[in-house]
Amino acid sequence: MVTPGRILVAERDPELLELVVPVLRLAGHRVTAARDGLQALGLWRNQPFDLVVLGMVLPRLTGLEVLHELRADAERTQSAVIMLSSLGTREEVRTAVLAGADEVLATPFTVQVLRTRVEELLAERALVGAST
């Protein structure tokens, strides 16, 4: 198992948020939830997160707008980012990856897929951190 991570989850759909947050907490991670992009960005700026899970469509700032801000911060670009997409189209996936997302998961997804990708990205991040 990977060392528990500090994870920020931003999602407008309360049902999806209520699924993702407990699943990640049960896996041992410290999870903070946000219901809109502006809140997510404020939380991210005030504390370190190892991984950020962003819905594509968020109130006040979209997931892509938040992602651009995360990647523009030269001192804190190390956070892994998973985007959640209700469309999952090639163009949407391509846009998110080009903007700096490490992964795009189309909804609906299984809990196991989410846990696996979170663990893999945290493990990759730990390896990169250990080699620098």
Image (cartoon, helix red, strand yellow):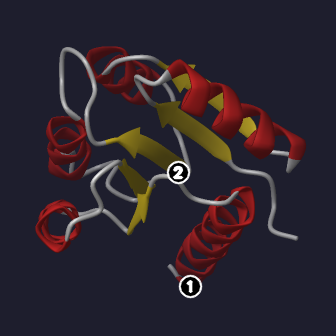
Is 102 above or below relative to 109? below
Side (left or right) of 128 relative to 36: right
User: Mark 2, residues whose alpha carbon is within 10 Å: few (<14), some, or many (≥20)?
Assistant: many
Q: Indicate the quadrant containing the N terminus: top left, top right, bottom left or bottom right.
A: bottom right
Image location (x, y in percent) of residue 44: 41, 30
Image location (x, y in percent) of residue 53: 47, 45
Number of the label disc, if any, that sits on residue 11: none
Q: Which residue is mark 1?
A: 131
| Of marks 2 and 1, the one in the foreground | 2
Number of the label disc, if any, that sits on residue 51: 2
Is 41 above or below relative to 93? above
Q: Secondary structure at mark 1?
A: helix
Side (left or right) of 120 relative to 88: right
Residue drawn where x is 53% and y is 79% of the image: 128
Q: CA distance from mark 2 to mark 1?
A: 19 Å
Q: Are the residues flagged by discs 2 and 1 in contact, CB closer than 8 Å?
A: no
Side (left or right) of 1 relative to 38: right
Q: For this rendering, which residue is in front, 43 or 11?
A: 11
Q: Earlier in the sequence, mark 2 or mark 1?
A: 2
Residue drawn where x is 20% and y is 61% of the image: 96
Image location (x, y in percent) of residue 18: 67, 26
Q: Amino acid at mark 1?
A: Ser
Q: For this rendering, which residue is in front, 85 or 67?
A: 85
Q: How many marks?
A: 2
Residue drawn where x is 53% and y is 41% of the image: 49
Residue drawn where x is 12% and y is 64% of the image: 95
Q: Amino acid at mark 2?
A: Leu
Is 130 above or below relative to 91? below
Q: For this rendering, which residue is in front, 94 or 52?
A: 94
Q: Secondary structure at mark 2?
A: strand
Image location (x, y in percent) of residue 97: 22, 69
